[in-house]
Image: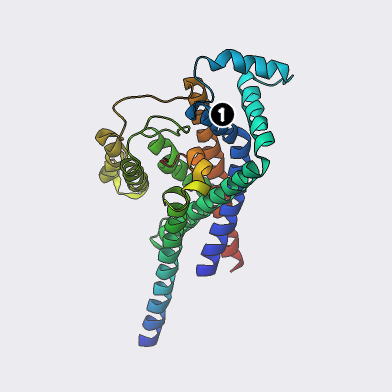
Amino acid sequence: MGKRLLASALFAGLLAGLVSAALQHWMTTPLILQAELYESGEMVHGAAHAHDGAHAHEGGHDHGAVGAAASGHAHDHDHGDEVGLTERAANTFMMTLVAMAGFGLLLTAGFALAERLGAGRVGLREGLMWGAAGFACTQLLTGAGLPPELPGSAAAPLLERQIWWTLTALLSAAGLAVLAWAPNPARWLGLALLALPHAIGAPHPEELWGGAPPELAGLFVARSLLIGAVGWTVLGAAAGWLWSDERRAA
Amino acid sequence: MQNTTLRHAARVDAGLVSIVGAAALGLTLVFFAGFANVTHDVAHDSRHAIAFPCH
């Protein structure tokens, strides 16, 4: 059982991690690099607009304006410090793999526990539901208080945000479990657990002073959630499938 | 009878141990990827993209 648990979790984590990391490299990392130019003062919100447009058109890029600007800046960095950027991309790939492997282990431990407690067998379809729940707990519900942020955004002290994030992820998981499995009138308490961290409220700074344009921040939030949804879908489906397949063979 | 019970108990425990072990390992990996100060620099872009609190 231990081997099956580890194997399904780690293979699923690896697959979901590779998919997520590839999407991040394509869709969010260019936005992070661009935001760092605003963070360092190399570009200034407002003054930057005309420059961006000119840059994109001179380069002859025919994709969307923001994408063109983003890749233009990534190239600028490439010329300056190619090794640094490659190493940075490798680090991002590695840490996203580590995160997804960790989430995969938690998900699969959840499968095993639920089966022991008589909640029914987990296969691909159930795995998809678990993946959706994982996405809700670690991205959607946490993101409703602390949205994905570009570097240089205004934010409350790190520790306070980490505590709120952890509390929200745990309460959301508990809330979804109660909604799914508690007997009938009590199950609605799950909604209260889901709402509690938002009633308490996420820590936010008193003043907002983020340097990056809101257009960039909005794009980053949407892309980050999209990648999270894809990653957790792959993770849940793969973990559920591997778990059930190995179970049948055993 | 007693033997069967004992064997059953041992199997139940082994199952629980692997569940707890997997969950603990999972939490450790998530902690290093998302929260630990020592991994901040390598994990920076990944943390921002996954929406772990960063900076």
> Residue A176: where, in percent of width, then height?
37, 44
Q: Quadrant of the C terminus of chain A?
A: bottom right
Q: What's the chain of the residue with tag 1?
A: A
Q: Is residue A147 above or below residue A110?
A: above
Q: Is residue A249 above or below residue A159?
A: below
Q: Quadrant of residue A161?
A: top left
Amino acid tagged 1: Gln
Left or right: A232, with B6 as reference point: right
Residue A120 makes an appearance in the image: no
Q: Which residue is mark 1?
A: A34
Left or right: A234, with A63 as reference point: left
Residue at the spot 52% in from the left edge and 14% down from the top edge? A47
> Residue A179: where, in percent of width, then height?
34, 44
> Residue B13: where, in percent of width, then height?
39, 73
Q: Nearer the viewer, residue A65 or A123?
A: A65
> Residue A139: where, in percent of width, then height?
44, 39
